[in-house]
Every structure is written in C-alpha cells, then in structure tokens.
Image (tube, grey):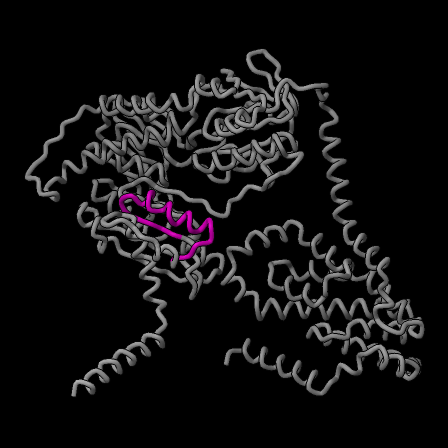
Amino acid sequence: MKKRGWIVLLLGLIISCFFIFDLDRFLSLEALKESRDDLHQTYQQQPLLVIGIYSLIYIVMAALSFPGATVLTLAGGAMFGVWIGVPVVLLSATIGATLAFWMARYLLRDIVQRRFGERLETINKGLARDGAFYLFSLRLAPVFPFFLINLLMGLTTLPSSTYFWVSLAGMFAGTAVYVNAGTQLAAFTRLSDIMSPVLVISLTVLALFPWLARWMIERVRIRRLYARWPKPVQFDRNLIVIGAGAAGLVSAYIAAATRAKVTLIERHKMGGDCLNYGCVPSKALIRTATFLHQAKNAQSLGLAQVSAQYDFAQVMARVHRVIRTIAPHDSEERYRQLGVEVIHGKAMITSPWSVEVNGQALTARAIVIATGASPVIPKIPGLETVRYYTSDTIWSLTERPQRLVVLGGGPIGCELAQAFARLDCKVTQVVRSDLLPREDADAVSLVSAALQADGVTILTQTETLRCEKQGDAQFLLLRDQNGASLRLPFDALLCAIGRVPRTEGFGLEQLGIPVSDARAIETNAWLQTIYPNIYSCGDAAGPYQFTHMAAHQAWYASVNALFGNVKSFKVDYSLVPWTTFTDPEVARAGLSEKQARTRGIAFEVTCFDLKELDRAIADEAAHGFVKVLTVPDRDRILGVCIVGAHASDLLAEFILAMKHGLGLNKILSTIHTYPTWSEANKYAAGAWKRAHAPQWLLNWLEKYHTNRRTKARIKAD
C-alpha cells in the first residue's frame, strides 16, 4: 500500500474510534458546565501544562475536523479568561486548520486536479489574485463551517503561509466572541444562545467589510484617475471604435444593431489585417498552390499526365481579386447602410471621452480600441540592405523568387513556406526553436514530413546572425544547433516570426493606459483598461491573435461598453479553437497532450487514423488522425487535435460538443452521412467506446448466447 493509503487508513481508524467510543460526549455544553470548576482549579495549579494539553487537543480536533470546536473554545474562556484564552484558542485553531488544509492538499488535491484541473484553472487564477480576500471573508462569516473551508482551500493553489496568517486574522472576531462567552458559561443553556441573530448578522457584515473597503478604494482611485480630464456635459455618440479590422467591425455592428450612435475610425483599409494581408490572401494563395500540387500528383487519381502552366503574376493578381470580391462585406458603404458613421483618418485619444480625427473632436460615453497588430521586424544586422518581406508586404510580389527563405516556424511561416514551395520556389525555412511549438509532436511530425515532401528545407534550432549583400547576391548567415556557420543565398526573405499589437500613436501614453511587455493593451476580465469606459479587443488586447477570437472579444467589449451599467460579461476563453492551414491541416481545440501534462491534468487519449476512413481513401488523402483527450474512464472531452484534409471543418462538431457539455457517446449516437469526412469524428468516438466496453457484461453476454445455442441443440435432439 502506498504511503498516502496508509495515512488515509490511519485517519479513518482514529475517526472511527472517536465515534465508536462516543468521545464526543465530553464535548457537550452540559459536560463542560459540570467540569468547569475542576478545569479552572487544575489550570490554577499547573497553568503551562494545562495550556499545552488544551492546545494539543484543540489542534488535533481541528486538524481532523472533529465536532466540538465550539465547546472547546468556550472551555478556553472558562479556564483561561479572555486575555489568555483568546490568543491560546486562536493560535491553536489556526494551527489545526492549517494542518487540515495540508492534509486535504496532500491526500486529495492531486486527485481533484487531475480530474477537474481544467475547470479549477479559473478558480485558481481568482485565488491567486484575490485569495486572501476570499479566505478572510469566509473566516469572518459564521455561516460557513470552518472544516469545509479547510478542506476546499486545501484543494486549491493558495499558499500555506497566506492561509495561516489570513486565517489567524479572520478567526479573531469569532474566537473573541466565543471565548468571552466561555467566561459567562452559566448564563447559557444551549450553544445557540451564544450566536444571536444580531451577532450573526454583525459578523457577516464584518465579513463583507474587506470587499466594501476594496470597492471604495477602487472608486477613489478611478475618481482621481478621471479628475484631470474635463468630462463633457453631453456626448455626441454612444461609442467610438478605433480600427476597422475584425474586432472593430463587429463592435461597430453590434452598436448599430442595438440602435446606438457609433463612429468607426480607420486610418488605412477597411477589413483590417485579415482581409488585406492575412487570412484571405493566404488562403487564396494556398488554394492555387494546392491545385498545382494535385496536378503534379495526378497519377494518384488514375490520370496519366496533367500539365498545369501558370503565370506567377496572374496567381498574385487572383489573390488581389479575391480580396476585392470579399471587400464589400467590410466596406464603408455596407457599414454606413447599417447605421455606422465611418471616418477615414488617424485617431488620437485625447481624453477618456474624446477622440480627435482629421482635426475634428468627437466625444462618446465609451471607446473601443481595436487597432490590430503588425508583423514583427526582427533585429537582424544588415536586414535593411536586402530584399525582405513580411506577411503584410509579400502580396506585392509579381515575380516569383527562385530562392525564398522563410524566417519562423509558426502557422504563418509553415503555411507560406509550403504554398511557395508548391509554386516552384526553392524554400528554406529557418526556425530558432522547433516547428509549430504549440502543437503536439505527432502533429508536428506529419506537417514537417509534408513540408519536406513539397521541397521545403527545414532548419530548426538555428540562429540568424546577419544579412549580407554582395553586388546583386544576398545571403543570410546562420548558426545551427551544432555551432556550425551556414551561408544561405536567397532572392527574397520572408519574416514570419510573429505579430505585435499596434498600440503606439493613439494617445495611450498620454492617458497612462498600460501595455504589457508584448505591447498588448492591459485589460481586465471585462476588457476594460484602467479607464472603465475605454475597452480594447482583438490583437491589440490579446492574448490570442485569431480573427475569430477578435470577433468573440468584440461582442464582450461592445456589449459591456454600451450596457455595462446594467450588466457586464466576463470574456469566455474556456474554448479557443485554431487551425494551421498547411496540407495536412492541424486543427485543435481545448487541451493538447503537452498542456495537460504541464498542468498535471489526468487524461486518456483516443486516436482514429484517417487511413481507415473510406472517404479519405477515395480522395487519396488517407493520412492524418483524429485525436481526442478525455477525462479518465469518462467520455467528457478535454481537447481535440485533428491532422488531415478538412481538419478545420471536422473540428466544428467537437467544438459544439465541448461548448455544450456533450460527450463522445452523443457524437457516436449521431448519424453521419456516408461516405464523408465527418465520419472520422464518429469513428473516433467509436474507438473510445470500444476501449471502455464493460468486459464483465460482454463475458456474461457470451455465456448467454452460448447457453441459448446449447438449449436449441438439446431441443433439436
């Protein structure tokens, strides 16, 4: 038996003995009254010994959560009086509570964290921020059983030192009441006489005092923050939105849909990064590159030969045509028809309620900052002397670079490296660490193999030293993981090492709105900045740089900005899906194996190989997998990773299931059209079901069927 098991057995034995031998009879009010004089006399004769024994008994009782703490506290007052009784009881109770806290943490926390770690993550974050306030309030309020507080707090990540000192302070008021009552023991006939309704209400109000004080301090801070800015007597608008990307457009749309007067300011292109430089152009390029790849591999479809000739300039022209086709969805005309005032120009926030644009001062009750992000330009010596591009400027190419170097191993770098390789560029991908570092190794290995099969040379664990130019020749100097130097010639260099929030030049510095080390605007759970009426969402706020997350945040920012005085909503980050649009695609939601192990969350893995899927075989795309993480022995989904063709589309069913608490059994019982890619989800659920089939029942059924066959043979004879 493990050490933890022996401890549980010992504790169970002690608790059983306590109740079997009816030891709680010594902890009644009547027993205390009868022995009061004897206890007091013994204390007078040997005070230190009595205090020591009393403290030891109290600590053990509190540590094991035995009933009788109230009577013991009264006994402390009866024996020691108020001045000695209060510190003795308080210290003993706190030590006992801390021991109970430790036992719960040692015996139960790992089990609970493994099973419910994902759900407890939010609670742990809240306790890390406000744990002392929560605990202090619970200790002051007599309506919460202390043994339950010890147990539940032990399951969290609250530091032991914080627990001890806050418990010591929080239990002072209640301890003083009971110890004082113990000095007047004869006046009470039952324990309920001590805690009158008035006293209970008083202590409960006292428990709320820290939160009230905190609220008042916050109100004073905000009042001082706004004091230096003159507030308009009335406002021209309900909302001003800065930035017309995904987050800004959704914010403005919601405001207009609720009949608020809203102004949308954009200094460059409507539609923002996604339409003009990111999602739309990259997927248009990937579509052309995929077709060329399929044409080159037409023999796999039974075609002897397919010839596909293309003009690179025409390919890039198609990319811009796709952008122009989608642009009306995000255009000024459409949003003006929706009731949004659209202004082109650079916005400057001049006060918490005013924005200046094109020399015009606008006022609004609330402001939403949705200024997006821009590509990171690495600090590489000599970069300015060579022909380099970013994910924003690569779309200006009209001539295909023969040799392309891609810096970065994230989704953008992988997607564009593969696309240009399929367009007959000789592509070298240089990665400082590892390819797709946020994904599990099994997914990365498939993507890496696919990139290399398309001709991409991948250099991982490689440091970029500098760029050099000699005449028309351009070189990138590198150092590999073994310390060897490399000199890589190239025609074009694509910097795809990430994007940084666009937060400079909008007046944030003048208002003192803080930004993080990553330059994202710091917001609270409601997307408010330090000014409660100024919000931020999308890439400018982070933490996710996805178009769908920008739109998700925009709902919260706009609704809170417009209706926060009635009801506010915390942003829900519980389920964030994302996809890397390589071939094969990598689509994921919830926990990865890597994340689950890092957080100590127990999980099971069920995997369905797409080589077994009929439709994948028919499409000559039978490679990849559907991997599902579940709670051990349960069908509740913790996370999903799909690698393969159409992975981004297959993920939607799992997102719906996770969002609404549907397990794999529900997916298995849903009819999926044959033959389709979506059947992969059902087969993954079926694999889980087979692995968890009750063997005892199957064995019984086997005997049942055998018995039925035997009886039939006997009757026939």
Q: Residue furthest top?
A: 359
Q: Quadrant of residue 48?
A: bottom right
Q: Is residue 73 above or below residue 671?
A: below
Q: Quadrant of residue 347?
A: top right
Quarter of the image with the C terminus is: bottom left
Q: Is 149 included in the stretch rendered in magenta?
A: no
Residue 514 x, y percent position in the rendering = 61, 33
Residue placed at 23% from the left, 31% from the top?
Answer: 288
Q: Which residues are magenta?
A: 640-664
Residue 109 x, y percent position in the rendering = 57, 65
135 left or right of 650? right
Q: Residue furthest left?
A: 304
Q: Quadrant of residue 134?
A: bottom right
Q: Is residue 596 above or below residue 412?
A: below
Residue closest to the eye, 336 or 535: 336
Q: Is residue 181 above or below residue 658?
A: below
Residue placed at 21% from the left, 29% from the top?
Answer: 402
- Residue 503 shows in the view: no
The count of marks equals: 0
333 left or right of 705? right
Residue 167 x, y percent position in the rendering = 74, 61
- Residue 403 shows in the view: yes
Q: Is residue 505 above or below residue 717?
A: above
713 left or right of 496? left
Residue placed at 26% from the left, 21% from the top?
Answer: 317
Residue closest to the eye, 340 or 45: 340
Residue placed at 50% from the left, 24% from the top?
Answer: 243
Q: Is 646 included in the stretch rendered in magenta?
A: yes
